[in-house]
Image (cartoon, rainbow, N blue to C red):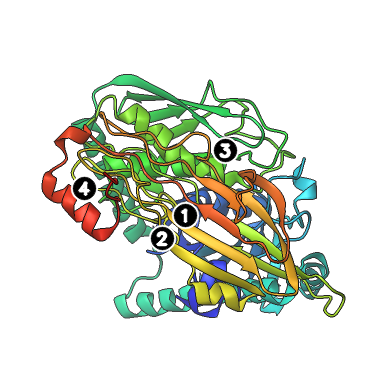
Amino acid sequence: MTLLRTAFSTSVREAGDLSAGVYTTDGRMLAQAVTGTPGHVNTMAESVRHFLNEIQRDEMYEGDCYVTNDPWKGTGHLHDITMVSPTFLKGEIIAFFACTAHVVDIGGRGFGADARSVYEEGLLIPILKFVNRGQVNRDLIKMIRYGVREPDKVVGDFYSLAACNEVGHQRLLEMLNETGYENLEELGEFIFSRSRNATVERIQSLLPEGVWSNSTIVDGYDEPIKLAVEIKQVNQEIVVDFSGTDSVSKWGINCPINYAKAYASYALKCIIAPEVPNNFASLEPFKITSPVNILNAQRPAPVALRHVLGHLIPDLVFGALAKVLPDLVPAEGAASLWNLHISVHPTSNCESRQHEILMFNSGGTGARPSLDGLSATAFPSGVHTMPVEATEHTGPIVVWRKELRPDSGGDGRMRGGLGQVIEIAPKDGYEFDFSAMFDRVHHPAAGRNGGSPGAAGVVQLDDGTRLRQKGWQHVPEGRRLILKAPGGGGFGPSAKRSEENRQLDQVAGYVTVPEE
């Protein structure tokens, strides 16, 4: 809540693109905040150990705070800032707090897929001290201010992240004082043993030993990409392997393995043990592997849009699990967020300042076995849609329309969730470039068990000009950008949808009545 209340970037304070957690002294995730994306939560589960490997224990002091945005040691791309802080009690480290958030800019080419290496994507901060014994690293602050387009917002978010860990530290000390504990070791081991046992019990009760596979084709940047997975249940563990997936892309849509692991684990947990708390032990039975490919890209591959393919991983995993659990797994949904980064600039020389705006949007989720899909809802990321007023406040644009997209949910016994239509234009005297980060334009969400696919996404100008689903593009003064986010697939044969539900769809405007 501290991070949400004090953040400068709308992606943090409005959309909740963040996470926070408490960790044991050896870097195991003990508990997480209830807000936050699986991509942040589950990558931090590994990233804290990278901090412990690079900063020795005798170099840690009370009042310290450490930072990185290294995609392979943090949470997957340069825009995510991860901070880790030690908690001391009576001179001994008893825990670590970690948090992460997506900042509006990190320099380089900006938030987009057009870079050819991570070196072009912005400022890379290795693991180092942001605060040393209570003193902020002023040299780092100067580097950030001179390296990004929105220095006040980015630096403000750095302080917000540090404040988040500090509040966690203070609250933990208050709890220990109240309960009489001197550390978290006994409590942590109890939580870990219960969580792992509960997860293993769910695996045993739901899945026989076996192997299940799935593959899918997604849009990619300039050509379609194949994603493939094999899931194996053996010895009370689930092994996920991404062999067969296409090779590393030359564009910034690659995914580091830490981010692929995060969403594969999340998908497994959604189906197998959703009620078990998410921590080191409940994730431990899930083993995620991959050869080097687009879901296991190695440094220095460009990874700015790692979330696009990362958000498609749950649907990929669900497709394999559906072969053994057909009545538990939902249909495919829009999956990837329909984010866009807008860079607004004046058409005359009256103003030199450029405005950087990041806007989060969502399509529809897939229909569930017993419920319709959710409309305009971010799954699997779980972030919020930003209020139009907050977006317009950050720069000279107008959001003329933001409404549900009729007929976009796939038909079926259960209907897929609807996408949305968004219409954006620069104010008079301005034009903008925008970075498209979209998928399911050419390969819509598939239905499940006889359900129909959802509607494909559309990117165009108001004069009908079709635009690409990824990459930086231009919207001139006087034109409007129109986004039609994809819908989720349906579940079950459409002939089995009840007449009552069909009438409700028409009354609500979710499905239009055909003209006779």
Q: Earlier in the sequence, mark 1 or mark 3?
A: 1
Q: Which mark is residue 41?
A: 1
Q: Earlier in the sequence, mark 4 or mark 3?
A: 3
Tell me which residue sits at (69%, 68%) in the image: 356
Q: Is residue 166 above or below residue 34?
A: below
Callout in the foreground (4, 2): 4
Which amino acid does the dot numbered 1 rest on?
Val
Q: Is residue 425 above or below residue 261?
A: below
**Do tag 1 and tag 2 residues touch (Cβ < 8 Å)?**
yes
Alpha carbon distance from label 2 to label 3? 21 Å
Q: What residue is disc 3 on?
A: 257
Residue, far right: 349
Foreground of the two, 450 or 243? 450
Pick the quarter of the image with the N terminus.
Answer: bottom left
Q: What residue is disc 4 on?
A: 371
Residue 42 visible within the image: yes
Q: Earlier in the sequence, mark 4 or mark 2?
A: 2
x then y, percent, for residue 124: 75, 55
Residue 94 visible within the image: no
Image-quadrant location for residue 202: top left
Which amino acid does the dot numbered 2 rest on?
Gln
Alpha carbon distance from label 1 to label 3? 15 Å
Tell me which residue sits at (55%, 66%) in the image: 11
